[in-house]
Amino acid sequence: MSIQQEVNLKNKLKEVFGYNQFRGNQELIINNIINGKNTFVIMPTGAGKSLCYQLPALSLPGTAIVISPLIALMKNQVDQLNAFGVNAHFLNSTLSKAETNKVKKETLAGEVKLLYVAPESLTKEETVEFLRASNISFVAIDEAHCISEWGHDFRPEYRRIRGIIDQIGDLPIIALTATATPKVQLDIQRNLQMDEASVFKSSFNRTNLYYEVRPKHKTKKQLIQYVKKHKGKSGIVYCLSRKKVEEIAELLRVNDIKALPYHAGLDASIRMANQDAFLNEECDVIVATIAFGMGIDKPDVRFVAHYDTPKSIEGYYQETGRAGRDGLEGNCIMFYSYDDIIKLEKFNKDKPVTERDNSKLLLQEMAAYADSAVCRRKQLLHYFGETFEKDCGFCDNCLHPKERFEAQKEVQLALKAVQLTGERFGIDHITHVLTGLRNQYVTSYDHDKLEVFAAGKEQDAQFWSSVLRQILLSEFLEKDIDSFGVIKLTQKGEDFIKNPQPIQLTKDHNYDQEVKEDEEK
Ligand code: ADP
Ligand code: ZN
């Protein structure tokens, strides 16, 4: 990059956006796309992804296309850019014919710097033709994880994007996401045919967020106490259903807390008014379904509570990520019960088989996270493909550690079970083999004839599942990148089987038991 180019970018950053400095990888990313290279950005929510395509769009001749899945999010960004004096527009189903024509005309005249397009609009023949006639600088694909069936927010139209870009022209692509596990990341790159892209992955560690999981027991009482402890501060309470949202908002209100509901069943005008009240601090707490928060930029949210257990770790991480964006305190609490997991599984029963299986795996990961007594941050970061060596000292499990036990024999046995079943199965299957469950899969693979079959029957399935997950965290095992849910041995794992060493593991929480004991008191 020339010094002149560097100065120009800095000037624009200041003049247009009012910022003095780039954050993290922003400058490297921006230069990469300005130089016409395919770019893949993985950054946690709130880290500043938008600027990575907005600034290059201003620096390059022509119009940048931004593909974004959410109409509300598009509108927010376009409004914000217009307020900065940037000519930006969107094309989606909310525009009238006349409005659409006006946007197209301005774009063809070369006046528009950023054009946000919904994937449904992009796949229309007339849109493709219009874009082919325009001078396009590059294509940004926001929320790129929507491409992957393995993610938590799959959108089939997203898989058609690559083909359409090819019809428009030979254009550099920048794909951005806040939620790429290694598996999803690979899927995105393959689908967009950007194996050679420069990948910029920032750490997902949000050091200022405190993570805590509590059993779902007398939850209303717990929630009221919790919110009162943060009295006068901004917070979000997530619930699974609209009905629950209404109920909890009301509950908080009668307890003298300024709370408002937000969900897709409310009138658009009420939704907007409640959101504004939250942003303007006329209300402290917004009780919402996951419909709330995408693109909402309130830096001083001090707590995020999950009243119901979330559907996936990706979703949980993104929602908790709305706390403490300013880098100051952020408290994240989740109420967990296995009943919620079962309920969520039932919601999926009408979905196509693969989708149902994927959702089930995501739910199991969620349940395992909640039950685990291992450092929460370690688990979250591992889930997103990062190694975090030490325990963080700033989560419930670190502050209230459970007793550890010597597990050399158990670890060796679990590893052997993975090895002898051929490294082609997931945690559930290995657990079935170890506990001696003679189900259809176990017998059809003759795994009931293995020496490891029922070798761990003194312990239950939760125990073995927890052992397997902990040794996955310590990299004795790894997830197979090509088959979802399958675990394999690492070199470290193979060495351990031959030459076992003392090793300490933690027993899972048993929240149901804790609740029972509490009730007996
Ligand atoms: P993401 O899309 O990654 O969730 P955003 O693009 O919405 O994040 O940015 C989050 C916040 O950070 C926004 O308020 C944005 O204006 C701000 N921001 C982005 N880049 C910078 C920067 N270089 N300096 C200061 N603030 C920034
Ligand atoms: Zn921790």
Image (spheres, rainbow, N blue to C red):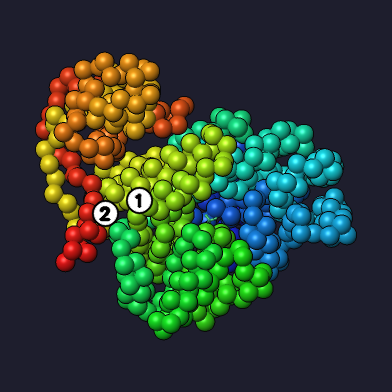
Residue shown at 39%/28% (left/top)? 486
Q: Secondary structure at mark 2?
A: helix
What residue sits right under mark 1 in the picture? 338
Work out how far the residue at label 2 is from the one at label 1, CA to CA, in angstroms. Answer: 8 Å
Image: 135 above or below 296:
above
What residue sits right under mark 2 in the picture? 512
Asked if labels 1 and 2 touch by Cβ distance under 8 angstroms, the answer is yes
Residue shown at 46%/45% (left/top)? 345
Image: 430 above or below 180:
above
Identify which amino acid the numbered label 1 is placed on. Tyr
* Residue 136 makes an appearance in the image: yes
Mark 2: C-beta under 8 Å from nearest atom of ligand 2: no
Residue 332 place in picture, x, y as percent: 36, 62
Left or right of residue 430, residue 456 in this image: left
Front-lying residue, 388 or 216: 216
Residue shown at 16%/33% (left/top)? 458
Residue shown at 34%/22% (left/top)? 442
Q: Secondary structure at mark 1?
A: helix
Residue 354 place in picture, x, y as percent: 53, 34
Front-lying residue, 466 or 62: 466
Identify which amino acid the numbered label 2 is placed on. Asp
Q: Which mark is residue 500?
A: none
Residue 83 place in picture, x, y as percent: 68, 69
Counting other residues with Cα less than 10 Å from the Cα at mark 2, is it few (<14), some (14-19), or many (20 or more)?
some
